[in-house]
Amino acid sequence: MGLLHADRLFPIEEGARALARALHGSVKDLPIVSPHGHTDPRWFAENEAFPDPARLFVTPDHYVFRMLHSQGIPLEAMGVPRADGGPTETDGRTIWRLFAANYHLFRGTPSRLWLDHAFSEVFGLERRLSAGTADASYDHIADCLSRPEFRPRALFERFGIEVIATTESARDDLRWHRMIRESGWQGRVITAYRPDAVVDPEFAGFADNVAALGELTGEDTATWQGYLAAHRKRRAYFKEFGATSTDHGHATARTEDLPQAEAAALLAKALKGTCTPDEADAFRGHMLTEMARMSLDDGLVLQIHPGSFRNHSQPVMDRFGRDKGFDIPTRTDYVRALRPLLSAVGGDPRLTVIVFTLDETAYARELAPLAGVYPALKLGPAWWFHDSPEGMRRFREMTTETAGFMNTVGFNDDTRAFCSIPARHDVARRVDSAFLATLVATGRLDEDEAFEVAQDLAYRLAKQAYRL
């Protein structure tokens, strides 16, 4: 038996399973639309070989190293760089052997599905990873990575990716996107505008970041109007490199629609570093509404990703920096938090606001009813900790009854792990096929409608929502 079961994630009952199999067959080879992610545009610009299996699968993937770390394995042992430049493991084979010896930790997790899919479908491995297969699998993958057909652009084309969006900060010069464009390669790699470092007064170096934004744009960002003008200029610059969206990873979903004088006063306090935590949150919230108004002018889709308590471990933050697997979901309010923004612009169908959540309790109670009535609001897919078969199923079960399918946006893989992209889309297409087959089997959807909706969820909704 290979690494992948042919009917994985399909219903147990044979009739529904057969229909799910047919539905999946109708969408499994559709192009991949990846409108929100964190792959490195440098990969596609330089098109260099990936260095080794460990640095492809282990060291950059917080899903992998957080699980190993939960069992007491130091991040240094997995090659995760230290903020102070101190010593970490650099030998890829040593890191791989450690990973393989602990592969049992991933049993039953979505990471196991993604990894097995990549090992089997991308690299042709047939035996489960373990201490006993570590060296053979390492050698095989390393040999593959040395070949032209495993370079980033070749894999992009092999995966059937129609378009992929990376995510860059407001101050990024987009050099890699420029290099891609000037190379003549036809792969569509676009950017997305992520201004957290210059809209969050609690972001490290906020005042310096805003000053640098002013130097970059020629605007006086110490003034409110100059600060807004600088954002408009950067958004326009990002649009030159294909951006169709902005992305905002705030701690809460709070929005505000403040008088301009009050917003200007908050900016002044933020630049001085004297904002209280509530004032910082209010400023972030107001900037979401300002960004929504800018979207009415320039057409960029607004994405809001709230509800993560980021960098929960201060020692890990100090030793390794941000985004090292210690981001934890928190409770999030949406009804009251989104009201200022939605009252201001939520009735305008020209605007698209896509909201994600790490708080599943809000699906049926808050998010689906909001998306089911406001023309501007759409629901992002099951995200991050819930990017799993069970999480996807719960999302469909709790949102479809109120928001339907057309107020959702398909699937986002939202990953830095390049080889997991086809795996993640396959999981989503299988789960949605299973859900649709169950609706048909229980008399709530006609079979021809199920095949149409399967196309929407796998492909069309993402293109429409993200204006691709």
Image (cartoon, helix red, strand yellow):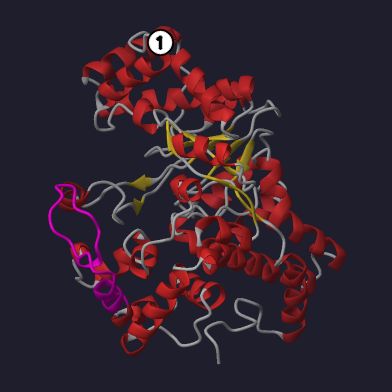
Q: x and y percent of residue 413 in the render?
A: 54, 55
Instruction: State the residue in front, 319 or 335.
Output: 319
Q: Residue at x 43, y 32 (%)?
A: 254
Q: Residues within 10 Å of mark 1 (few under 14, many from 20)?
A: some
- The image position of residue 267, as x and y in percent, is 33, 16
Stretch of the chain drawn in magenta: 77-99
Q: Which residue is mark 1?
A: 219
* 31 over 278 or under it: above or below: below
In the rendered image, the quadrant that contains the C terminus is: top right
- Residue 224 in view here: yes
Asked if the stretch drawn in magenta spans residue 86, the answer is: yes
Q: In this view of the protein, which residue sits in the foreground, 430 or 27?
A: 27
From the viewer's perspective, is 350 left or right of 194?
Answer: right
* Among the 4 quarters of the image, the one containing residue 369: top right
Q: Residue at x 42, y 9 (%)?
A: 226
Q: Is residue 407 visible?
A: no
Question: Residue 225: percent from the left, percent from the top?
Answer: 44, 8
- Residue 278 lies, with reference to residue 8, above or below; the image says above
Horizontally, residue 314 falls left or right of residue 302, namely left
Label 1: which secondary element: loop
Quadrant of the frame with the N terminus: bottom right
Q: Left or right: where does residue 153 sit relative to residue 351?
A: left
Does residue 431 lie above or below 336 as drawn?
Answer: below
Residue under the image location 24 percent in, 24 percent down = 276
Q: Residue at image x 65%, y 29%?
A: 351
Q: Is residue 103 above or below residue 198?
A: below
Residue type at the position of mark 1: Glu
Q: Position of residue 250 (x, y in %)?
A: 40, 37
Viewer-proximal residue, 451 or 114? 114
Residue 272: quarter of image: top left
Task: Please say whether residue 395 is one of the residues in the magenta stretch.
Answer: no
